[in-house]
Amino acid sequence: MTDLALHPRALPRFPFWLLWAALAAICITLWLEPGIAAWAVKYPRAMIVPIAQWIGAAMKWLIAHFQGFTRGIAAAIDIPLQVAFAVLAKGFTIGGVTIPRLAWVGVAGAAAIAGHAFGGMRLAVLSGFCFLYIALFGQWDSAMLTLALVIICVPFGVALGLLFGILAYRSKKLDDWFIRPSLDLAQTIPAFAYLVPILLLFGSGPVPALIATAIFASPPMVRATKLALEQVPEDIQSFADMTGCTRRQKLWRVMLPTARPMLMVGVNQVIMMTLNMVIIASMIGAGGLGYDVLMALRALKIGAGLEAGLAIVVLAVALARISAAAAARRVRHAPPAGAKFAGRHPHFTIAVAWLALTTLLSLGVPGLGTLPKDMTLTTGPFWANIVEWINIHAFDTIDAARTWLLLSILNPLKNFLGGIPWPVFVAAGALLGYQLAGWRLALLAGLMLLFPAVTGLWDKTMLTVYLCTISAFFSCLIGIPLGAWAANSSRVDRIMTVIVDTLQTLPSFVYLIPVVMLFRIGDVSAMIAIVFFAVAFAIRYTTAGIRQVPPDLIEAARAMGCTPRQIQWRVQLPLALPAVMLGINQTVLMALSMLVITALVGTKDLGQAVYAALTKADGGGGLVAGLSIAFLAIVADRLIVAGARRLRRRMGLPET
Amino acid sequence: MGRIMANDDRVKLACRGVWKVFGRGAEEYMANDPTPTPDGLRAAGLMAGVRDVSLDIGEGEIFIVMGLSGSGKSTLLRCLSRLIEPTAGQVFLDGIDLLRAGEADLIEIRRHKMGMVFQHFALLPHLSVLDNVAFPLTIQGVPRPEREARAREVIELVGLGGRETAFPNQLSGGQQQRVGIARSLAVKPELWFLDEPFSALDPLIRGEMQAELLRLQSVLKKTMIFVTHDFDEAIRLADRIAIMKDGEVIQLGTPEQLVLEPADDYVAAFTRNVQRAKVVTARSVMGPIRNTSVHQIVRASDKIADIAPAVIEAGSPVPVIDEHEMVIGSLAPQVVIDTLIGKDARA
Ligand SMILES: Nc1ncnc2c1ncn2[C@@H]1O[C@H](COP(=O)(O)OP(=O)(O)OP(=O)(O)O)[C@@H](O)[C@H]1O
Ligand SMILES: [Mg+2]
């Protein structure tokens, strides 16, 4: 009744529960009598559409015709990359003369100076210490390889993002039909999936890693650029026109500089995503910290793995803080009139001078260039001992917990999802889409869910859904109460912000290290790693959602005599629900993006299919599995967002 | 009654039958029905921001556009400067049809003939005061020493000398708007658009800036089109005022005409709280010529508020002379007092 009153044009509601009941009935029937329609229980092999082969063939054609061209590009990109490697990590050798790489003392000092330039003394100390740590713990060489990759990748990602962001801003058509769908795909297809074609086109080595990284890291820059340009105040745009700017002048001299703060937020994100991706990509040939961790994990060298992992953390923290501070910097001091370059850019000048000086000195004092082996510390044995101690004293407990989780939660869910006939699952997705947002979403969900079935990946897809569902569930179970707690106490919130910030800074790969050490390889480890990675989003969105509940509503509730508990459960959480749902959405997407990485610890889902295709250089198979993951992500995203929008409308909250 | 008619002087900017209709398919609708009614437009899902406006703005005139929020002032200004394309009508600058100008011509015209000051200043946050003011010249490719010299000149003119190296976020609102004014003057525009330039400022600073503007105008003699919704500001600055309502200009005249003969209740509502004595001239309230023995004389164009003390002091009617020094009437102290306390002296 109320629904009719709210939506006067709504027809009498169709009894959707009947359809759901029918789907359940089909499910149960097929479960009891699988013989009735064997094709629905298991997708028949003969009906598999060989999309993977088609893609493979198309790729062969591409390679045959364009490899010369793409390899040429690769060679061109390789030049700055090799220079960066040489400057930071390897040194130059030209005609027998060796020019040393930048001294570690110099780089650490320059990092501190950069910290000071953007964030003052505290940031200077923090970033200085981060680099000191890397040097002291003997991770310098690998860390500098990683840093060199980041330094070369970021400008590519930023330039790519700027270019497409500007195009999207200029042409709505281009944005709607090409750029936005590409962004959706680029962010949901696991990077491993497009790594194979890139490897084939661009050859092996660090260049394909760099290209994959740029594709992976530029979407936030595209979005930030478009948003930033749209947010330039109308007055300023009119000013540009009234001054007689040409289109180019308007864009480059007025719009982009005015949008700088927002653009810098995009740059910050590009840096973090680049680091994340570089760590992963380094496993396929670029070298660096990620490679070290992987090697250590494979050889079960726990201490070494943890140390390299911590070096990643430390590098990530330094880069995140410096770039975030650079993005947030607003106040500027007018330089003294008539100042020379050095006067206008004192930090930069000092940093360069310091780098040059220390590197020169390192010719005489090699310790400045490379910290001598006997001066580096290692905590490897220490960590190994701790893990060993845990394993000795707590092994039974941990193993019991693991087994319990597996037997009483994970496996039942796995079997349940695996038992749903594929047509029922596809139909359920479409039906849900129809109920939430109409036939367009129904069609999208139906077709996208059909894709893994017709490509013969259904079983792996269900494993993916299972792992992703259970991880998202635990993330929310932990994250939502924590978020609610933080929303109601500013002290908790401060601590939580630090934790969440750190969790979001760390490259996803890092989470695997401790988990694998304690829980061995398998679904439970994968799940825990995903939960660690994804829980930050559940916390953050819940806090934000509760915070945005209008305070006068809470006061009204208090005036009516609600207890704090009642206020929280009856007022805050229901009103925060749409925002919380968006948090769940992010959690699910993050879980999906983490799957390929957990494939490294032996899962059997789509992530594994992507990873396996990568090792076999099977471009078609990798892309199809990657697309399946992307489609799952897109369907989940659209369904949850549509659900949240419906909720918002029903509660009369403003649309976002 | 003396009118300052635009056609006394050379017309700088004119417009004929300008319409701006918002919404999809506005052009087609206007093509079918060149004089649509508001109801007709609404039925078609359209909205008129500016309705059939024709104006002649004289050279050197301060022309004020007034109206409530949403009455279409900014839209009219943007049509006149062609920041947006009018749906119908013509706009002439120095007799040249602005709407026919190509992109390159328009850029040239804007670079050399027009300047605009914005309500929210629209300063570029990444440039210093000096670079902001020099920006229009930079865009034109004027060499650095030349443009900086010119920028310093106008910065000095608006009284900001010494703050050249500051950045916009280090300045107060009033200072920022001075930068905005200096910047719009840097190219020596002939036509000066100001869209509520002082609305974001507090009343004290606003008064100061109005005085500053009048001082600048006495030196520069630009043609000024000034949007405001503050009638006190309007009467202080205006040669003529156009009052807008729902996109239409419903009355056009001198401040005095608007106060004494408001066209309807809407205009009357604007003028109700005005101190009449600041607007009304001796000419409007004077009586017939009388023989008096007073030495005091007043001019017909004097505002009552300015001459009140002298006339009241005199104690009996004072002769009023016109611009040819001819006596054309007399002003009694009682009339002055009535005007001061707001009674309609002509009744
Ligand atoms: N781009 C647009 N699209 C649709 N309607 C518009 C657009 N710009 C302005 N309008 C409408 O035209 C009308 C006039 O707007 P305008 O900005 O000219 O008013 P204004 O008199 O300047 O008001 P204010 O004092 O608030 O600045 C308003 O009703 C506004 O909603
Ligand atoms: Mg306006």
Image (spheres, coloured by chain):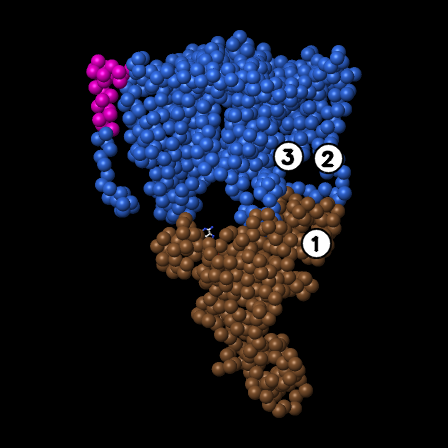
Chain colours: A blue, B brown
Depth-wise, is mark 1 or mark 3 nearer the camera?
1
Q: Which residues are magenta?
A: A20-42
**Number of numbered tags placed on the structure image:** 3
| Measured Cα–Cα span from mark 1 to mark 3 | 33 Å
Q: CA distance from mark 2 to mark 1?
A: 29 Å
Q: Which residue is mark 2?
A: A346
Q: Which residue is mark 1?
A: B155
The amino acid type found where label 3 is placed reads Gly
Query: What type is the residue that disc 1 sits on?
Result: Ile
| SS under mark 3 | helix
Task: Tell me the number on the disc at residue A119.
Answer: 3
| Label at residue A502 | none
- A35 drawn magenta: yes
Query: Is disc 2 on the same chain as disc 3?
Result: yes
Q: Is residue B42 magenta?
A: no
**In the displayed structure, does residue A372 sit left or right of residue A10?**
right
Q: Quadrant of the N terminus of chain A?
A: top left
Residue B61's spot in the image, x, y percent? Answer: 60, 65
Query: Mark 2–mark 1 contact, CB under 8 Å?
Result: no
